[in-house]
Amino acid sequence: MKPGICKHKTSPWHDERCGAGVRYDDVCPRPGDDRGKGYRYPCTKYDALSNHGKRTVNLHGPQGTCDRYEEPSAADIADYKREIEEATLRMMQTLPIIAAVKAGHKDEDWQGVEECPQCGGILHLSHAAYNGHVWGRCETVGCLTWAE
């Protein structure tokens, strides 16, 4: 979350609607194809310096408008940063478990459970032999979940 991007924006590639309930297809003009569609969403203000300090130019048709566009406040941005920091700290608790699973089950598919380092609940784990990735999901709603 940052200035120049609507506080309700989610991923139009994964979500049909933004956080304010607006359907992305209802506010994105369609010039006949989907090329540059991301630049036509009204969620990002391209008149601002938004691309690592470089001015972004929309060459893909008119940008849509949305009456629900809302800039994030300083408090919204601070809350978002705090949530990211907290999530990062939670995930760092899993690193020893991930390392142990990778070391103990190298080159084999495996599934098992461990005690969740966050809540003490049951953490379901799986390891894939083909790429060495470890996935995890705690049974406690809202606790740890990840996929490498």
Image (cartoon, rainbow, N blue to C red):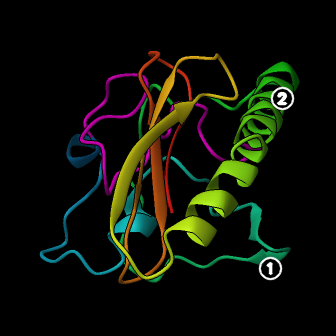
Which segment is the magenta one? 1-23
The residue that appears at 86% across and 28% down in the rendered structure is 78
Residue placed under numbered mark 1 in the picture: 54
The residue that appears at 64% across and 46% down in the rendered structure is 5
Q: Image height check: is 124 above or below 103?
A: above
Q: Is residue 27 magenta?
A: no
Q: Position of residue 98 (x, y in %)?
A: 63, 56
Residue placed under numbered mark 2 in the picture: 82
Q: Main secondary structure of the magenta part?
A: loop
| Mark 2 neighbour class, 10 Å CA radius: few under 14, some 14 to 19, many 20 or more | few
Q: Position of residue 136 (x, y in %)?
A: 47, 45
Pick whichever of labels 1 and 2 is earlier in the sequence: 1
Q: Image height check: is 27 above or below 122?
A: below
Which is closer to the viewer, label 1 or label 2?
A: 2
| Mark 1 neighbour class, 10 Å CA radius: few under 14, some 14 to 19, many 20 or more | few
Name the secondary structure under disc 1: strand
